[in-house]
Image: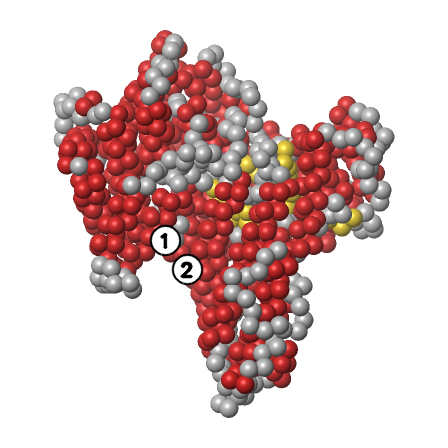
Amino acid sequence: MSSTPPITQNPDIRFLGRLLGDVIRVYGGEALFRRIEYIRSASVDRARGIVGSHEIDSGLGALTLDDTLAFVRGFMLFSMLANLAEDRQGIAAEPGADVAAALDRLEKEGISRAKVVEMLDRALIVPVLTAHPTEVRRKSMIDHRNKIAELMTLKDIGRTETVDGDLIDQAIYRQIALLWQTRPLRRERLYVADEVETALAYLRDIFLPTLPALYSRWQRALGHRPASFLKPGSWIGGDRDGNPFVTADSLRLALSRSAETVIGYYLRELHELGAELSISTELAEVTWEVEKLAEASGDKSSTRSDEPYRRAITGIYSRLSKTYEKLTGRLPARLPATDAEGGAYEDPAALRADLVEIAHALNRTGADSLAGNGALGRLIRAVETFGFHLATLDMRQNADVHERVVADLLRVAGVEADYGALDEPARVALLRSELASKRLLRTPFGAYADETLSELAIVEAAAEAHRRYGPAAITTYLISKAESVSDMLEVNILLKEAGLFVPGDPPTAAIMAVPLFETIGDLDRAPEVMTQWFALPEVAAITAARGHQEVMVGYSDSNKDGGYLTSVWSLHEASSALKPVFAKANSAIQLFHGRGGAVGRGGGSSFAAILAQPHGTVQGRIRITEQGEVIAAKYGTRESAAANLEAMASATLLATLEEDALQPKDAKRFFAAMDEISANAFKAYRGLVYDTEGFRTFFRQMTPIAEIADLKIGSRPASRTRSDRIEDLRAIPWVFSWAQARVMLPGWYGVGHGLKGFKDIGLLREMLEAWPFFQSTLANLEMVLAKSDMDIAERYVALVEDEAMGRDIFGRIRDGWQRTQEALLSVTRQTRLLQKNPSLDQSIRLRLPYIEPLNLLQIELLKRHRAGEDDPRVREGIQLSINAIATALRNSG
């Protein structure tokens, strides 16, 4: 066995850790500082093997409840600052994950810039922000963290003072002091409106300024101005699956606030642009198009009579102010100085056209450096990218809800008394007949269920959004639990009621119905369902007009259903099998990957994940969910956002244009091996989780699942139903609770059974060497194993009331972990985990001494809480420990 290398902290961690210690000493007192420092040093000594685990007092027993709360906050803040330091040092960055590097790589393979540009003209890459409740930190904590990052950047370039004259080190200390005194926990559960505002903060402060800057960089690398192929999306305010608090009003709020945010941004940029474009006709020529804009501006000031660009901008500002008022119902913060001709802009294209006229004029008069680049160029790019809607909002609902609503509509209309009793062919025939008819089902004289009225109000709000903000505001209606063609036709029935599906020859659909295949069975049936879908003539006509069809594949529920290995392999197989289905239908495929933050829910490197997709399935079009703690980690600062968006773009280029890394003969062998490995892994996982008597009770008692459900981190319930079945539990708390107990079971269980049951180790090593899918799968697996800790996990077994059952089930889990580790090390030719990934190894091992005491305290507090102790500090301590452990692990759900 190789020896474990010593941990070397980067200088930022030492600097920030020292300041945190100073803050605790000043604001918490010397005694508290010494107690925390003793626990820290004792834990570090144990983690580094300097002393045995039982040779030194941990110091935890001496803490009072008040001390416990302060201690947990201290360790949580250290982990937050360590995360910040590592992000700054680029520990998570991946080599070659930028567009310039991708272009060079493609050029060496004979793929020209012209071919890349051609592909980008039809490409679409969308990171989709969701409100999935995995971010345990309050926004206030994240804001202080981001201010520290900004100050550290100034420190990097040698500055000692801020622009306001504060000393940098003192300003950082001040932010850490504010963090220490900021309440980490939310007192009230989040509402949908809160989630909307949180997303808007990222879109306003990060995406709006970052994406135009990235496009400028990509334009230089390409030598050509690319189309706006990367745009943000959102589910927040439109995702109703299991969340009764998302309504038509939520949809309207999300879209209205988005329009207010993005148009407000354009107005501020226009104001600054007007100040900048001080070009005088006495010193430069001007085109008649700009003169026309200037004359229509209403600006008759004699002081600006020779400054047509400024007057033109004034007119554009005036018209955009009217647009703001029309779409938001309120006046902008800065009122226009004139009343321009033309009224409000009809759509973003009209605004862009005026801006482009100014850019063309600057080009024609020799000021091209003022046109395509700088503030004007960035504003034009922003309008192209964000429109008047900022981020395209998806709608999502469960197929069971659609079935009930359509059944209600058909019954009241006298068309079909018992739709639910029909078989699939009969349903499809009836729904197609209704979609071909121009008659609506709803009547003002009918009595409908509240659910029906709510769902109809949603599609009516979507139609209203199209009229107000344009069709780009909502393009997609996702169907959770999609299993059949009728599930998709039912959505079109609802869209038809709002005028978003119009019968005809051919029919038109303003919003695309998109199936979400989530379970292992759903993924297996996906190619058959889509084959039947494309076989419908009306669907073929709509798809031909659109040019593509989207399919969403779910990582979370497929993992909960079949375990990590079977989940990722089923997703890969389904994607591969869909490719010829789409080719036969002459439709581009657009895969939407429902990934979470943890590996058990599809987490890990987006760059590696995109490159690992089956060859020919990306086709320049991909959407990926970004949720919870992932949003703050990836998009918390402009620098991290730029790096992550660049990684998505570069990986999509490579996955689309590079030749298949696998030879057909290798693919056949590798796929057959994965079929066998996955089958054995699936059998082991299902055997433990679904076939073991008492496992459900074991899980709910060993992990803090009930306490996680009590956290105020999201607007939606933790379970889809009141059942305590694992099948009905949402994937987020399932993964979250196993992470807290340091088991991480959804990210690895069954893999060892699959790998060890496969006898050809040489073939497995070939697969690792040649196959990006297998490389990504094992890399994520290895990270999860390194973050898990069976010794700490065993301590949680004491929470299980039936001791014999607890020992028996945990024994199987520990054996499975050992089997998985041994198999992984054998395939990767390592003697210890992460031996070949020293940066990640350092990152995880740095945190381990800070996580163990938190786990031990959490266990003790859980015992007291479950025994009936009602001191509110016990409950607060549990919630703080959940927060702190999630921060240290950098994974929630």
Residue type, numbered disc 1? Pro
Residue 269 picture location, percent across and down? 49, 67
**Where's the N terminus, which quadrant?**
top left
On screen, residue 30 above or below 460: above
- For image coordinates 69% across by 40% down, the residue present is 457
Residue 490 at x, y percent in the picture: 73, 36
Q: Tell me the tag on residue 95.
A: 1
Q: Is residue 824 left or right of residue 323?
A: left
Which disc, if any, is residue 101? 2
Q: Which amino acid does label 2 sit on?
A: Ala
Residue 171 in percent (x, y) is at 25, 54
Q: Residue 810 versus residue 869: which sits nearer the camera?
A: 869
Secondary structure at badge 2 equals helix
Would you say the residues marked 1 and 2 are in contact, meaning their CB atoms lie under 8 Å apart?
A: yes
Q: Quadrant of residue 412?
A: top right
Q: How far apart are marks 1 and 2 (CA)?
A: 9 Å
Q: Which of marks 1 and 2 is nearer the N terminus?
A: 1
Q: Quadrant of the C terminus?
A: top left
